[in-house]
Amino acid sequence: MNFLPALVLGVACFLPAASFAQWQWVDKDGRKVFSDRAPPSDIPARSILKQPGGKAAAAPAAEAAAAAAATAASAPRAGASAPVPKLTGKDKELDDKKKQAEAAEAEKRKQDETRVAQLKAENCQRARRAKTSFDSGIRIARTNEKGEREFLDDAARAAEGRRLQDIIAADCKAP
């Protein structure tokens, strides 16, 4: 008796899968379309990739390539007026999005470089002002860790002057 409920449950699990009958075709713009309804009547049978009942059509790219080859073989060689469609396999929208992303990345990189250049210019200007103060010979005082005011001696003054000169050399390149 326990076998019957298990069988009913098993059948019930497979019924929803059958109700999701899917159609798949390539529309006139070359995009794949998935639907639970049949394609419009203007879609040729060769563009239908999949239909309910497990029937699958051949890949449209292979058929289109074969059709293009047949058209090219049947077209007259000299003075052929019918153009042969070329299959590039590229998605224009995807290419456009990729170009936009690259342009946005380049713009961001440019803004970062501009910001770094501005910071270097400000740092250069501050270092030059400080170097001028150190070279003027006035007494320079700093506040130590304890909050006390200390005057720089000649050795500390020379070390700070060398440090400022290194900053100027690094950040203040002639334009």
Image: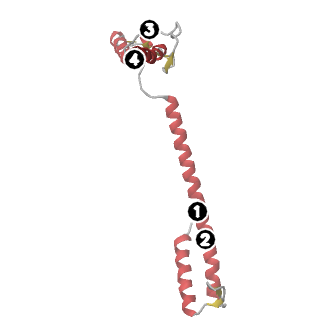
Q: Nearer the viewer, residue 57 or 80?
A: 57
Q: Which of marks 1 and 2 is nearer the N terminus?
A: 1
Per the image, the residue denoted by label 1 is 117
Neighbour class for label 4 at 10 Å: few (<14), some, many (≥20)? Answer: few
Amino acid type of disc 1? Answer: Ala
Amino acid type of disc 2? Answer: Asn
Amino acid type of disc 4? Answer: Asn
Q: How far apart are marks 4 and 1 (CA)?
A: 79 Å
Q: Which of 33 and 174 is in front in this view?
A: 33
Q: How far apart are marks 1 and 2 (CA)?
A: 10 Å
Left or right of 61, for residue 42? right
Report the residue that reaches farthest toward the bottom: 154
Q: Residue sitting at 34 percent across and 11 percent down?
A: 70
* Residue 2, numbered label: 4
The secondary element bearing badge 4 is classed as loop
Q: Residue sitting at 43 percent across and 16 percent down?
A: 5
Q: Which of marks 4 and 2 is nearer the N terminus?
A: 4
Q: Distance between the residues labelled 4 and 2?
A: 84 Å
Amino acid type of disc 3? Answer: Ala
The secondary element bearing badge 2 is classed as helix
Q: Do residues under tags 3 and 4 come within 8 Å of each other at their CB atoms? A: no
Q: Do residues under tags 2 and 3 come within 8 Å of each other at their CB atoms? A: no
Report the residue that reaches farthest toward the front: 1
Which of discs 4 and 2 lies nearer the camera? The answer is 4
Q: Which of marks 4 and 1 is nearer the N terminus?
A: 4
Neighbour class for label 2 at 10 Å: few (<14), some, many (≥20)? Answer: some
Which of discs 4 and 1 lies nearer the camera? The answer is 4
* Residue 123, numbered label: 2
Residue 49 visible? The answer is: no
Report the residue that reaches farthest toward the left: 73
* Residue 45, numbered label: 3
